[in-house]
Structure formats: C-alpha cells, structure tokens
Image (tube, grey):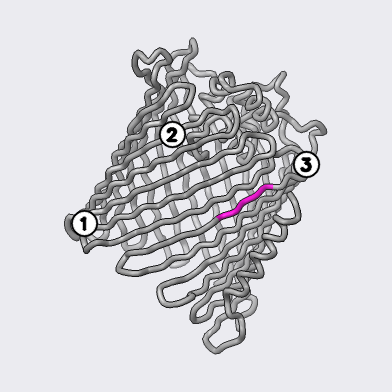
Amino acid sequence: MNKKKYALIVAGCCFSLCLCNVRPANSRVTILSGELGLQQEYNSNIFQTEDAEGQWTTILLPTLTLSSEGDKDLLSVSGGSILEWDQRRDVREFEHNLSFSATREIFQRFQVTLSDGYSYFDNSARADMDPLHVSLTDRFARAGHFSQSEVARLLFPEISYTPDDYLQVLTQLQQRYDAADQATRDEVDRYLTNSPDNGRRRYWENEIVIEGTFEFARDSVLSFGYGYSMNDDRSADITEYYEHSPRIGLTYRFNPQWLAGVNYELTKGQYDQSDDVRNHETTFIVEYGISHRDTLSLNYDYGCISYQGEREDSIEQSGEFGWAHDFTPHTRLSATFTGNYLGREYSYDERGGEVGLGLNHLLPRGTVSFGFDGLFDEGERGDNSGWDHLRSSWSVNGGMTYDLLQDLSTSVAVSYEKRYEWLETTVGKSIFNDYSADVSMTYTFGQWFTVRCGYTFNMLDVQNSAVSGYKEHVLMLEFAAVNDLMRW
C-alpha cells in the first residue's frame, strides 16, 4: 500500500477531531474506562471433523475506551487486543484493534459521523494443509475465518459468507473448485495450503466511513455516505485489496400507515492477485400498518456483481413479504416469505424460496423465543430443459434468557436443522442432521467484576456425503473486570 493510503487514515483522524468541539465545558462529560477479560476455553473438536482433535485455549482481552460527549457532539476512541495462547500446539496469536468515531450535529436535524476501524493480525502457522495428504474440504475446515471468507468470495460470489453458510460451502466446495478456471483455483490453493516457509501470517485491515443523515419529517431520513477499506499483507500470503463504497438512502413516511424507502450502494474492489469487482446493491422497502397490532412489509433487493476478468458475472434478485402481529405488548408473532433468483453469466441459474416464523414473548425477568425456517433451491439444467433440486432444509430453534437473581442471569438455546443436498456427482442426495445446544450463566459481583461460564454441544449426522459427521463439546470460563478509571 502506498503512502497516500496511510495519509488518508491520518487525515480521517484529524478531521474527526475537528468535527467535535473538545474544549472543556460544563456540559461535556469525558470518561476513560478500562476492561480486562481472561477466558479459558476447551474445544473437543476444533476442526469439526470425524477424527476429533481437542484444544485448550487461553485468551486475554484488555481494552481501553475514551468517550467525550458534549451538547452537539460525541467522540469515542477505543483500543484493545486479543491475545490467544493455543496450549495444544504451544503457539500464540495476536489481534490488535483501534477504533474511533466522531459525531457532530452541524445544524438542527443534520449530523455527520466519521468512523475508522483498524485491526492488525499476527497469526501462527496454520495446521497441516498439505494438498497431497489433506482433502480440499478438510483444508477448508482447518482454515481460519478470514481464509474461509476469501475462498467463499472466489467460489461463491453470490453469498456474503458468514458461519451460517459453512455447511453449504463445505458440501459444494469441491464441485465449485473443479468448475472454476485455473487462476481462481490457484488463488484458492493459496488460502488453503501452507505458506512456503510455513511461517506466521501478519496483515492489517482498515475501514474509514463518513456518513451524514438529515431528518426532515416524522420517520423520514435522507442519508448518504462513503466507505474506504483496505488490506495490507505483511507475509506475502494474503490478497491485498482496497474497496470504495459510496451509498445513499431515503426513507419517507407518507402518513401514519405508509412508510417507504430506497437504498443504493456501489462497491468497487481492486485486488492485487484476483479479479477486480463492482457490486451494485439496491433495496426497496415498503411498510403498511394495518392496525396498532398488525404490520405488513415488502422488501425487494437487486444486486449485480461484475468482474474485470474471467470470473462470471451474476445478478441476484430477492423479494420478501412479511407480517408482524402483536398479541399483547409482550408477545409478537412474525412471518416472512422470501423468493430469490440468481442469474449467472455462464453456469446454471438458481431460484428458490424461504419461509420463516418467529414467536417472541417478554417475561417479567427474561425472554422466550421460538422459530421455524424452511427453504428450497433449484438449479436450471445445462440444456435448458428444466430445473433440478439443489438443496432444501427446515429448522426449528428455541431460546430463553432469565434473571435468576439480581446479579445472576442465564440463557439457554437449542436448534435442529434437517438439510438435503443434490450434487452433480454419483453420491446422489446427501442428508444432514445438525443439532446444537448452548447454555451459559453470568454472575456480576463487587460492581466491577463478572464471571461467565458456558457449554456448547454441536453434532452433525451425515448420510451419503463426502463430508464427515462430527461431535463437538465446548466449555468456556471467563473472568472480566470493568471500571471507569477517570471521569471529568
């Protein structure tokens, strides 16, 4: 990265200070607070594979935050680190974060916010990812979240990868890899293969965002902004990039019943070792209040991804119809139906639908929630003679939070998902049963101190798939202390 990009970060910091009037005043409150957390975690299956490998991890989390609030402005600066010690391999990983934000009311109903987030990563050498001995899917499972996200960006451009997409990507990874061009496969191999010296991976990321909002009527807002993000690799093992993201949005309430809005964002990404990309994203929103208990909503999204290279372009459209009903002020039922269509430049198109139901109830000392979700996706045959099943699933989940005592709270969550995959291979239909349960407890004492403990169980049962099933147990114990160090 050249010096102009570093200068942009410094200029952003200086501009944020200019936004806020930091001169002492009777109405200004400035607080310096500190937090220190120590976490011990045991994971019985760190790679979520059939051949389980356990790991003990100790994590130290120090954080300092300075906030200064005035009549018309707010300035916040925070710095923290995540220091992780893997006792299984006796290696250490570091992450350092620095963020600030400045908000200033320029005139009545119009304010400007500038924020910046900087992160530096120093990670240990990855586990054995030799392509001669470890399959592509197992190497993806062993990779960190950053590498998994980049692989998904290369092979699954239609999704914005999150951990919820892990199973979908894992089951189709080999198929997408085989169908990709050689340049894309080489780039995937860079992320899923040990570095030449098997050394540490050092890189930093930074994102600057400036945005303004103008409120001109009840629930009516005009917003605009610009984001600039970059990645600088220090280990010659990561694709460097920078992205520009201008955006604009308008929300307008016509009357107490009708609300409408439109948002547009353009992301232009330039990468040093893969195709540059442009992503146009437009969203339309309409809400109608039938009564004080019932609300209808309709959302439409249109996204267009184009590459300046050999990777295929795609267009994705989705529409969502929603209904929310309040049985009482403490109980709400929500229902959504979503339809989507994905058109690709060269390979087959996809279409699908999803339905979701959710029930939330507020207790005197907690909350209870239940949910159901079902989806299906189809892909158009290469000879344009019809549509084939790709995947379908249904899932149920439930959770509860409850304050047992004034300083003692607990939470419980369970979920089950039944998933089917139809791949263009000889294995035919694959079936996945995904179980998850989580329980945690938090105790606060001495005004400054908090103790948290938790247990998570995950199990994947697989039939007729190259992906293996697994069981995973995670135990966590954390001690944290938070205190205002100075106030003036």
Residue beneath the point at 38% across and 43% down? 301
Give the residue pinned by disc 3: 235
Give the residue pinned by disc 1: 289
| Amino acid bearing label 1 | Gly
| Amino acid bearing label 3 | Ser
Rendered image quadrant of residue 197: top right
- Dot 3: within a 10 Å radius of its alpha carbon, few (fewer than 14), some, or many (20 or more) residues? few
Select label 2 or label 1 by which is in front: 2
Q: Could you tell me which quadrant the C terminus lies in? A: bottom right
Residue 470 in view in this figure: no
Identify the element where label 1 is drawn. Answer: strand
Image position, residue 26 (x, y; %): 54, 89
> How many discs mark residues in the rendered view?
3
Identify the element where label 2 is drawn. Answer: strand
Determine which of the numbered discs, if any, sits on residue 315 in the image. 2
Looking at the image, residue 10 sits to the left or right of residue 335; the answer is right
Determine which of the numbered discs, if any, sits on residue 151 in the image. none
Main secondary structure type of the part rendered in magenta: strand
Identity of the residue furthest to the right in this view: 197
Identify the element where label 3 is drawn. Answer: loop
| Amino acid bearing label 2 | Ile
Looking at the image, residue 421 sits to the left or right of residue 139; the answer is left
Q: What is the spatial separation of the Cα atoms under label 2 and label 3, in whole angstroms?
A: 35 Å
Image position, residue 464 (x, y; %): 47, 16
Q: Which residues are magenta?
A: 227-231
Image position, residue 75 (x, y; %): 57, 72
